Image (tube, helix red, strand yellow):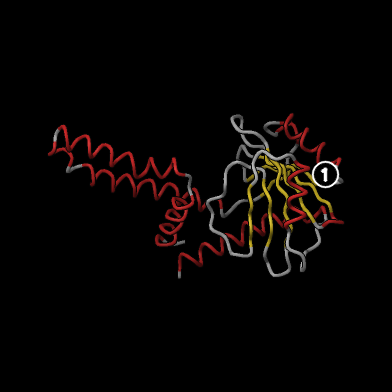
Amino acid sequence: MNAWILFRLGIEAIRGSNWRFRLFIFGSPALIFLVLLLVFPPAALVVPVVWLLFFIFALVVVALQMRQLLDIKLKPCLFRAVVNRDQIARLAGDLAALGFVHVGFFQVDGRDLFVEGLARPDWKVYAMITSGTEDTDAYVEFSSAYADGGSYCVSGGKTRSVLPRPANMVNVHHPGKSADELLGLFLRTRPDGGLLDTPPDGFQETVEREIRRMGEYIVKRGRD
């Protein structure tokens, strides 16, 4: 992955970030510049240079983090290693009541992020409970894949992914809704036709394939 693609990754990440992050990147230096311009004008001339260096540094850091996201693998793990076990157990109970079968627990690429996979093959739906962290709650998302390589996902997570994705890989967020509400919304809005089967033993491969496809799309955008 060359420097231009990394640059594009960083730009895409900043464009897709929330307003607080963009305000920090662009607003803080502007405020410092105005204050110095009023208090000590000569020093204000240094601010644009410092901001440019800071922006390049932030761009590189974000781009490298984005690159790591494109290489995500799921590693089977034991439940006792999972963060937010009580929340995950409660959500898993809700999903079991909705007819989902447990697939397994996975650690995301050696990080302190865990997911539980579940499947409802008769509805061609996968469910994934993401552990969150010690400071964030666990949440549920439902997804289906299509024969054309597309996918449809409804997530209860509060944070939207900043990764650009193909138009046929749709990710909708509805934070705060229960598993039952999310599933109802998912089934009502999911496009019909061309749905792939969701066997329990295909969960890990499907998730990794979706991430890999987004990575290929981003790399292609960086080269175009």
Residue drawn 23% across the image and 46% down it: 48
Residue drawn 56% across the image and 49% down it: 161
Residue in the foreground of this view, choosing between 128 and 75: 128
Tell me where residue 209 sits by quadrant: bottom right
Tell me where residue 138 sits by quadrant: top right
Element under label 1?
Answer: strand
Residue 31 position, x and y percent, is 28, 38
Residue drawn 34% across the image and 45% down it: 26
Residue drawn 76% across the image and 46% down it: 117
The residue at which mark 1 appears reads as 102
Tell me where residue 187 sits by quadrant: bottom right
Rendered position, 49 above or below 82 = below
| Three-letter code for the amino acid on which mark 1 is drawn | His
Say which quadrant the C terminus sits in.
bottom left
Tell me how many marks there are.
1
Residue 113 position, x and y percent, is 63, 39
Q: Residue furthest left?
A: 42
Rendered position, 90 above or below 187 = above
Residue in the foreground of this view, choosing between 189 and 61: 189
* In the image: residue 150, left or right of residue 62: right
Residue 184 position, x and y percent, is 77, 49
Residue 60 position, x and y percent, is 40, 50
* In the image: residue 166, left or right of residue 56: right
* In the image: residue 193, left or right of residue 155: right
Tell me the crowding category of disc 1: few under 14, some 14 to 19, or many 20 or more residues within 10 angstroms, Cα based.
some
